[in-house]
Image (cartoon, rainbow, N blue to C red):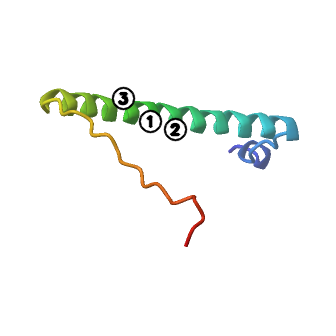
Amino acid sequence: MPSDDAMRPKRESAESKAETTKRVSQELTRAATERREAKTAKLRAARLAQEESQPEQPIAKSRRKTSDTSGSK
C-alpha cells in the first residue's frame, strides 16, 4: 500500500503557481484570439461573396442639413 505522503499532491511554490497562472492565461488569450481571427475571416469571406453577387450601385451623396448661423430670429 502506498503511504499517505504518496497520495498527497505536492505543494507548489508561489513562483510555480504564478507560472501556471501565466501559462493558462496565455493559452486562454491565444485560443480567444484564434477564435476571433477565424470568425473575422469567415465574416469577411461572406461579405466579399455577398458584394460580388450584388450589382454595383452608385453611392448616394449624403445631404447635410445646414443650420442658420446668421443669428436672426
| Amino acid marked by disc 1 | Arg
* Residue 42 location (% of width, % of height): 32, 32
Residue that label 2 marks: 32
Instruction: Mark 3: give few (<14), some (14-19) or many (20+) Cα within 10 Å.
Output: few
Residue at x 14% of width, y 33% of height: 54
Q: Is mark 2 on a helix, strand or loop?
A: helix
Tell me the residue at 68%/33% (across/down): 23
**Residue 26: x and y, percent?**
64, 33
Disc nearer the start of the sequence (3/1): 1
Question: Which of the image's four quarters has the N terminus?
Answer: top right
Query: Could you tell whether 25 is left or right of 51 in the image?
Result: right
Q: Is residue 45 above or below residue 64?
A: above
User: 59 left or right of 12?
Assistant: left
Give whichever of 12, 15 is nearer the camera: 15
Residue at image mark 1 = 35
Image-based side of 33 in relation to 53, left or right: right
Residue mark closest to the camera, 3 vs 1: 3
| Three-letter code, disc 3 | Ala
Q: Is residue 8 above or below residue 69?
A: above
Quadrant for the C terminus, please.
Answer: bottom right
The residue furthest bottom is: 73
Q: What element carries label 3?
A: helix
Q: Which amino acid does label 2 sit on?
A: Ala
Residue tagged 3: 41
- In-front residue for pair 54/42: 54
Gap between marks 3 and 1 measured at Cα: 10 Å
The residue drawn where x is 21% and y is 33% is: 58
In the image, residue 33 lies at what x, y percent?
Answer: 52, 33
Crowd class of label 1 (few under 14; some 14 to 19; many from 20; radius 10 Å): few
Distance in Å between CA atoms under marks 3 and 2: 14 Å
